[in-house]
Image: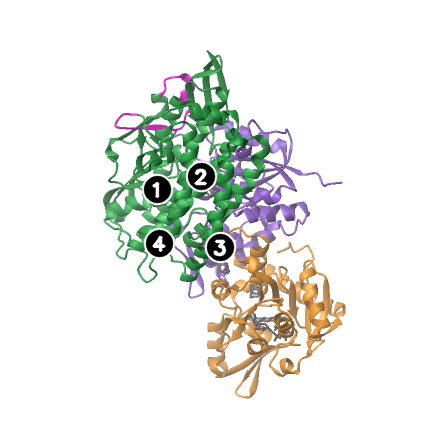
Chain colours: A purple, B green, C orange
């Protein structure tokens, strides 16, 4: 019996579309396993009332009640919620939004999705690659919980960035100088000098990939489940 | 007068509402209301280092990220009196054109739902995604990432790929062109198109056009102080307009259309002034962008610098005008103490196009009017962050 | 990577004791059984990989990332370098410079975690996990803050970095071979110079690797190999079939390995409570 395709819904909230593009780019290779309900391909409202997985991109504008309401509805409709991209999982660039801008100066607080509804997996990245989404579904459909543990734990965290990595790991002396953070930064904001990372503040967009790729940091958050 | 409301318009970039007023199936008026929350990038960059401003504004839009990066860099360079060296300017043009092709590929996917018969849409999806993957790899290798390229910075290129990378990209250029040609074939094959496409072919709709160049754009090709913007709800008095989160812009007080058709008519002998011409112009725009990319790869001289040397941030005012995929994009910037951003204003192409889209919808069927909205490739993330000019 | 409750050694297929069969390898100052070098020679000879990224001891404790393309280059790298190998950026540069498509990487558990995660979860386009075919992790109790430790060796024992020929980890002592003699330092004393970060590390065998390699006191001259997936299993069994290594069942030493793994986790918990 052909394995039932996973019903996957994608919804975007004030994202930049970058993550949406990653998702649609990943879709051709996932078509045998999942049925993706995404605005790019449809003509009306979402097709089903229930979904196995909901991929949520962009951040939650806390000053728009209808958005918070819609997020709660999605939580009801989907068995598993995946926050895809740094905006949805850790705030990302939206951490810098401060409101006060016309024509809606009241839109002043943007939060990661897990500030509004419980999230099952958070995948940082600005944006994460299409291959990342394909890998996620490969391990998810194989039920390989241990391999996905890092994204499960990240779903419980709200803020991770180069600044946090410096504070939590480097300044506490726990850094072992392996250089993984430098290779995991999309903007070259964190670099090793004399075997220790330094941060170039103006290049950091708070995407959080350096933090989850640091073996020390990811080991610690996976053990305790919260930030050290 | 009947009213057809789309609470969430599908197959566009971002969140918007569309209301079409129709009388026996013919649209009399349209309201295009962006509803996405305002992330407020102009406020976000105030007080920040200009390097951060470039990284941040790219994240206004995941479709035309490089365009914002380029326009912001140009504005800041104009403010501090820096010009990128030849290689830097050429590489920037290349990154911008790659992004143009990426963005157009996405738009073709979105309008496939209107223009192409149902049974052929999966073919189009596969061809477009194959092309998108191939062109994105060029942005990764040259710009450092396929989205929000970090190598694009003030004064030119942050880091420069090795010569072997250029050779590799040149060697693969034939595949890229072949992938595009296979896609183009599907996009212009009238046998697999819908009646909406036929209706749009019949709708002759010339307009006033705004374009600041073809491949790159130039702040001196337009009089940027003739641009004015007002909140949408001051432009449209209807009650529903209150909900809008964008501004709209005018040039010399008049509505102007900007984008591929504007570029093609202003800078190339493109004569198809039908609404279907919007689709054909975007196809030409993509093909010419790829060709120009090929030329640039041969024009780079590895031994020359890729970035201006003396970059010191200091007070000053500057304007960057760039031809983004959707049309003319303008960034104003004012730098204050230590060159930190004091003020930033951004005018995006969709702000010019919203009034035009509503105009063009008149006289069409409901289905065709909805398609025209998409053919102008509105980008809500870009449009919902801007601030009134004066 | 697992919560402490879960199995300390992670998922694995098989546990073996292995020894290189090639005399030339055994002659070199291999760490234990020379099995890692032998495995890699097999992989190179049979074209399973187009290069091996490993570490070569340069001075004192410092290691330099090297790409070995043949047996000779591999043999030069045998033995241990006790610093954490030069950081990942240099490894990436090496791989991309020589445009290697299928590499084997020998590294420590923390690096195995980074490479393993990058291979399974390519979040960034600049990730190069698709070029990594085998991740071979060495067991690890920690690496030295080598400037501090070298200084201590010079001040306390008059041993200069350039004269250090080899370092071997024994049951109670760290053996520092220099100028033809051996300086045995009690482990407790030596381990006070470990990097602080290593004191909170819980991964003894390298949970994200394809093959983990280490040694146990009870089997001198043999390397313990733990295969973690089909890929690792095929590599080890293939090397045996082609006569590169001698293989014995290793389940009887599992207890020892678990003991040290538990010690490392206990050490990590103690230090975590103190350092946070
Ligand atoms: C810092 C360190 C700590 C260790 N701690 C323990 C321990 O506590 N318990 C235990 O059982 N085993 C430990 N080992 C592993 C052990 O020392 C042997 O490396 C292992 O048993 C393999 O032996 P072999 O003879 O098969 O390896 P060999 O055939 O000698 O090959 C070893 C290979 O590892 C490479 N290499 C050496 N050092 C490094 C390094 N730092 N980073 C990356 N590659 C390297 C060499 O280049 C060589 O290719 C440690 C190794 C290191 C480097
Ligand atoms: S994470 Fe990055 S790419 Fe994704 S929506 Fe946010 S800014 Fe855009
Ligand atoms: S340092 Fe780099 S990887 Fe880390 S949060 Fe900042 S931008 Fe992201
Ligand atoms: S990844 Fe973590 S341990 Fe490695 S250098 Fe960066 S901060 Fe230090
Ligand atoms: S103890 Fe852990 S962190 Fe330290 S070198 Fe070994 S594996 Fe890496």
Residue at x-position 44% and y-position 39%: B104
Front label number (2 vs 3): 2
Q: Are marks 4 and 1 on the same chain?
A: yes
- Label 4 to label 1, Cα distance in Å? 21 Å
- Direction bottom: furthest residue: C180
Label 2: which secondary element: helix
Q: Mark 4 or 2 closer to N-term?
A: 2
Secondary structure at numbered mark 4: strand
Region in magenta: B236-254
- The residue carrying mark 1 is B45
Residue C171 x, y percent position in the rendering? 65, 76
Disc 1 and disc 2: Cα gap in Å?
A: 28 Å
For mark 1, give the secondary structure: loop
* Cβ at disc 3 under 8 Å from ligand 3: no
- Toward the viewer: A114 or B62? B62
Place of residue A11 in the rendered image (x, y in percent of width and height, measured from the top left) = 54, 34
The label on residue C126 is 3
Taking C241 as reference, is B86 above or below it?
Answer: above
């Amino acid at each position: 019996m052909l394995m039932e395709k996973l019903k996957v819904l994608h919804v975007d909230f004030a994202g930049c579309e970058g993550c949406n593009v990653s998702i649609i780019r990943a879709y051709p290779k996932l078509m045998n396993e999942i049925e993706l309900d995404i605005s790019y391909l449809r003509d009306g409202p979402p097709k089903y009332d229930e979904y196995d997985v909901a991929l949520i991109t962009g951040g939650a504008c806390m000053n728009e009640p209808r958005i918070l309401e819609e997020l709660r509805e999605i939580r009801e409709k989907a068995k598993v919620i995946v926050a895809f991209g740094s905006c949805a999982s850790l705030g990302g660039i939206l951490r810098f939004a401060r409101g006060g801008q016309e024509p809606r100066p009241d839109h002043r607080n943007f939060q990661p999705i897990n500030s509004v509804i419980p999230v099952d997996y958070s995948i940082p990245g600005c944006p994460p690659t299409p291959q990342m989404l394909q890998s996620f579904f490969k391990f998810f459909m194989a039920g390989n919980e241990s391999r996905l543990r890092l994204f499960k734990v990240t779903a419980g965290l709200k803020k991770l960035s180069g600044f946090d990595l410096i504070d939590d790991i480097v300044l506490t002396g726990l850094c072992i100088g392996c250089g993984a953070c430098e290779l995991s930064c999309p903007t070259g904001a964190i670099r090793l000098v004399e075997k220790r990372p330094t941060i170039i503040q103006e290049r950091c967009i708070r995407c959080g990939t350096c933090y989850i790729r640091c073996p020390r940091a990811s080991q610690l958050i996976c053990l305790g489940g919260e930030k050290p | 007068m009947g009213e057809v409301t789309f609470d969430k318009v599908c197959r566009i970039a971002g969140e918007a509402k569309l209301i079409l007023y129709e009388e026996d199936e013919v649209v009399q008026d349209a309201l295009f209301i962006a509803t996405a929350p305002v992330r407020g990038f102009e406020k976000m960059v105030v007080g920040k280092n200009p390097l951060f401003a470039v990284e941040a504004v790219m994240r206004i839009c995941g479709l035309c990220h490089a365009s914002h990066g380029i326009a912001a860099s140009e504005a800041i360079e104009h403010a501090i009196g820096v010009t990128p060296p030849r290689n830097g300017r050429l590489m920037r043009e290349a990154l911008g054109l790659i992004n143009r092709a990426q963005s157009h590929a996405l738009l073709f996917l979105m309008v496939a739902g209107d223009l192409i018969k149902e049974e052929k849409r999966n073919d189009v999806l596969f061809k477009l995604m194959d092309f998108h993957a191939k062109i994105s790899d060029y942005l990764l290798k040259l710009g450092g990432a396929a989205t929000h390229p970090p190598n694009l910075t003030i004064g030119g290129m942050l880091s420069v790929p090795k010569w072997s990378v250029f050779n590799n990209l040149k060697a693969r250029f034939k595949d890229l062109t072949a992938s595009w040609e296979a896609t183009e074939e599907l996009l212009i094959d009238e046998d697999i198109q819908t009646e909406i496409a036929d209706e749009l072919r019949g709708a002759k709709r010339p307009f006033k056009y705004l374009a600041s160049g073809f491949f790159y754009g130039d702040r001196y090709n337009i009089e940027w102080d003739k641009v004015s913007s007002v909140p949408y709800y001051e432009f449209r008095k209807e009650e529903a307009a209150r909900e809008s989160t964008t501004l709209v812009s005018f040039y010399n007080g008049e509505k102007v259309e900007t984008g591929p058709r504007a570029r093609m008519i202003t800078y190339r002998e493109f004569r198809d002034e039908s609404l279907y011409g919007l689709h054909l112009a975007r196809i030409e725009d993509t093909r010419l962008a790829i060709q120009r990319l090929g030329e640039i790869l041969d024009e780079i001289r590895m031994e020359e610098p890729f970035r201006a040397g003396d970059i010191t941030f200091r007070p000053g005012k500057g304007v960057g005008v760039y031809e983004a995929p959707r049309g003319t994009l303008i960034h104003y910037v004012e730098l204050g103490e230590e060159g930190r951003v004091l003020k930033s204003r951004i005018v995006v192409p969709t702000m010019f196009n919203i009034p035009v889209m509503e105009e063009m919808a008149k006289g069409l069927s409901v289905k065709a009017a909805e398609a025209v909205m998409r053919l102008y490739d509105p980008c809500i993330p870009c449009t919902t962050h801007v601030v009134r000019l004066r | 990577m697992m919560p402490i409750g879960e199995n300390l050694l992670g998922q694995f297929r098989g546990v073996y004791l292995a020894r290189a069969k090639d005399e030339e390898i055994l002659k070199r100052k291999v760490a234990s059984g020379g099995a890692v070098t032998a495995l890699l020679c097999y992989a190179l000879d049979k074209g399973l990989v187009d290069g091996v990224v490993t570490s070569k001891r340069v001075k004192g404790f410092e290691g330099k990332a090297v790409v070995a393309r043949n047996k000779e280059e591999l043999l030069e790298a045998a033995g241990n370098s006790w610093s954490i190998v030069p950081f990942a950026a240099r490894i990436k540069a090496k791989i991309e410079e020589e445009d290697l498509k299928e590499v084997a990487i020998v590294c420590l558990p923390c690096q195995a975690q980074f490479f393993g995660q990058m291979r399974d979860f390519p979040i960034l386009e600049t990730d190069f996990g698709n070029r990594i075919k085998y991740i071979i992790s060495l067991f690890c109790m920690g690496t030295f803050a080598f400037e501090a430790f070298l200084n201590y060796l010079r001040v306390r024992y008059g041993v200069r970095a350039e004269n250090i020929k080899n370092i071997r980890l024994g049951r109670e002592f760290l053996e520092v071979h220099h100028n033809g003699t051996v300086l045995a330092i009690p482990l407790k004393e030596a381990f006070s110079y470990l990097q602080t970060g290593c004191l909170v590390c819980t991964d003894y065998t390298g949970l994200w690797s394809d093959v983990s390699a280490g040694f146990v006191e009870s089997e001198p001259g043999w390397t313990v190999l733990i295969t973690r997936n089909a890929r690792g299993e095929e590599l080890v069994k293939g090397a045996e079939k082609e006569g590169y290594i001698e293989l014995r069942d290793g389940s009887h030493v599992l207890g020892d390995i678990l003991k040290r793994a538990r010690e490392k986790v206990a050490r990590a918990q103690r230090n975590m409570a103190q350092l946070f």
